[in-house]
Structure formats: C-alpha cells, structure tokens
Image (cartoon, rainbow, N blue to C red):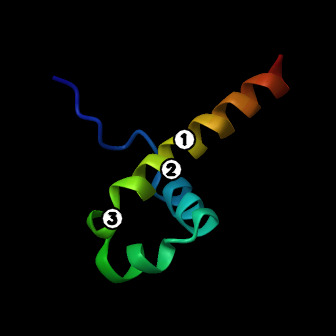
Amino acid sequence: MMSRRGVMSESFKVELAKELGFYEVVQRDGWGGIKASDAGNMVKRSIQIAQEQLVQKS
C-alpha cells in the first residue's frame, strides 16, 4: 500500500493554511490540530490551483 504522506510540500501546505486563515492553529498545535473542514478546504484549494495551472499550460 502506498503512503499518502508528502503529496503536498510542507511549504505549499503552509501557504494554503495562511491563505485560508488557520496557520496560527498549525503553528500552535501542528497539522493534527486543524479542523476536518480546514483540511477539506486545503484539498479543495489545492485542486483549484492545479486546475488553474493546467488551464494556463494548455
């Protein structure tokens, strides 16, 4: 079974957390301290960014 760790770089996750407004929680409690909804929003935003990059390339 493949590990899911490392799909997003740490710096990318930090940028997303800052953009989405919960980086203070990450600093205080680590990634395990964020809410499930925040994690979901990170995934949604990263997909949006990937889609935008694909559109720019085509």
**Mark-to-mark CA distance, 2 and 1:** 5 Å
Image-based side of 2 in relation to 28, left or right: left
Q: What is the secondary structure assignment of the residue under circle 3?
A: helix
Determine the image quadrant of residue 53: top right
Q: Contact (CB < 8 A) between labels 2 and 3?
A: no
Q: Label 1 amino acid?
A: Lys
Q: Label 3 amino acid?
A: Trp
Q: Position of residue 27 (x, y in %)?
A: 40, 79
Image-based side of 35 in relation to 52, left or right: left
Image-based side of 21 in relation to 26, left or right: right
The tally of labels here is 3
- In front: mark 2 or mark 3? 2
Q: Contact (CB < 8 A) between labels 2 and 1?
A: yes
Q: Earlier in the sequence, mark 2 or mark 3?
A: 3
Q: Contact (CB < 8 A) between labels 3 and 1?
A: no
Q: Position of residue 18 (x, y in %)?
A: 59, 69
**Mark-to-mark CA distance, 3 and 1:** 17 Å
Q: What is the secondary structure assignment of the residue under circle 1?
A: helix
The furthest residue to the top: 58
Determine the image quadrant of residue 29: bottom left
Which quadrant of the rendered structure holds the N terminus? top left
Q: Residue at x 57, y 58 (%)?
A: 16
The residue pinned by badge 1 equals: 44
> On screen, 28 above or below 45?
below
> On screen, 32 above or below 41?
below
The residue pinned by badge 3 equals: 31
Q: Residue at x 31, y 72 (%)?
A: 30
Q: Position of residue 38 (x, y in %)?
A: 44, 58
Label 3 neighbourhood size at 10 Å, few (<14), some (14-19), many (20+)? some
**Mark-to-mark CA distance, 2 and 3:** 14 Å
